Amino acid sequence: MHKGDVSTFDVSGTNFLLRGTLPRSYANFLGRKLFLFLLTVQGLGAFALITIAVFIRKFRAASQVIRPLMRQEIARSGSRLLPMFLFVAFALGLLVIGQAVSALARVGAIQWLGSIMVIVVVRELGPLLAALLVLARVGTANVVELGTARALGEVEALEALGIDPVHYLVVPRVVGMAAGMFSLTVYLILGALASGYLWAFLQDVPLLPGDYFGQIAGALTYLDFVLLALKTCAFGFIIAIVTCYHGLAQPLQLDEISRATVRAVAQSIVACVLIDALFIIIYLTVG
């Protein structure tokens, strides 16, 4: 009887402790996550400001070295990815038109085909898809290259030689990715719009080329061009900052580079989605 009482007391006491500690553990977990999030935002913000300051302050410094690096990064984030982007543009036109034509034909609203292409491809899907593709092809390479340079002591060697690592390693990547992202997004959108009419023609849609492109031109406004340029450059800038930060701004070992790459990809996707949401609000507010 005494043992049973002790057992019952222990079990009830354990349950009481569990009920008392679970909210605290959840609060600690959320607090740690929030604290790490704020530290990450602070680190990325400081790194972005440092990069902008170095770019402005040393705009003309070592131009014979930095300018070729910028052109190399523009080619790396732009022209070298063009064949893949043209293929994606061809598939994107099929995806959007293939789904839209059948739906619009059922309700007799083919005249809205160009407007749908502008809303879906030009404003939203084109820039975001281009950002994800550049992140997968170039952003991950930034983390691996800079993380390896950091782990092997190459960054410290540059500092010992009096070379600013941010000016030499980060600024060309930021400029190259922003410019490459803008150009690739333009090619992706133009290719998707052209392939969209091709798929509409193959489905015997009663829509002449002049009418189709006239619908697109009528749906476009000056705000679309301005916000498209700002959005794509913002995508390229934030992807370059996040990937360079995780590859360069933290002391890494070789076995930590893969985890840093995963973190950089996840944070870049979240940042791009948040930027896209911000531009949606701007569209709804200004437009």
Image (cartoon, grey):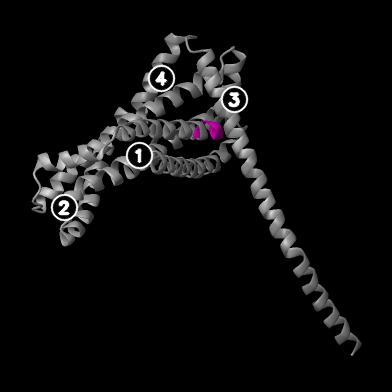
Mark 3 Cα-neighbour bin, 10 Å: few <14, some 14–19, many ≥20: few
Query: Which amino acid, by three-letter code, is at mark 2?
Result: Ile
- Whether the residues at callouts 1 and 2 have beta carbons within 8 Å, the answer is no
Query: Which amino acid, by three-letter code, is at mark 1?
Result: Pro
Which residue position holds label 1? 127
- Overall secondary structure of the magenta section: helix
Looking at marks 1 and 4 on the same chain, the residue that comes earlier in the sequence is marked by 4
Residue at left offset 51%, top offset 35%: 242
* Residue 227 in which image quadrant: top left
Q: Position of residue 98 (x, y in %)?
A: 20, 54
| Badge number at residue 68 | none
Which residue position holds label 3? 153
The magenta segment is 243-247
Residue at left offset 42%, top offset 9%: 64
Query: Which amino acid, by three-letter code, is at mark 4?
Result: Met
Which residue position holds label 4? 70
> What secondary structure is marked by label 1?
helix
Q: Position of residue 101 (x, y in %)?
A: 18, 55
- Which numbered mark, 1 or 2, is in the foreground of this view? 2
Query: Which amino acid, by three-letter code, is at mark 3?
Result: Gly
- Which numbered mark, 3 or 4, is in the foreground of this view? 4
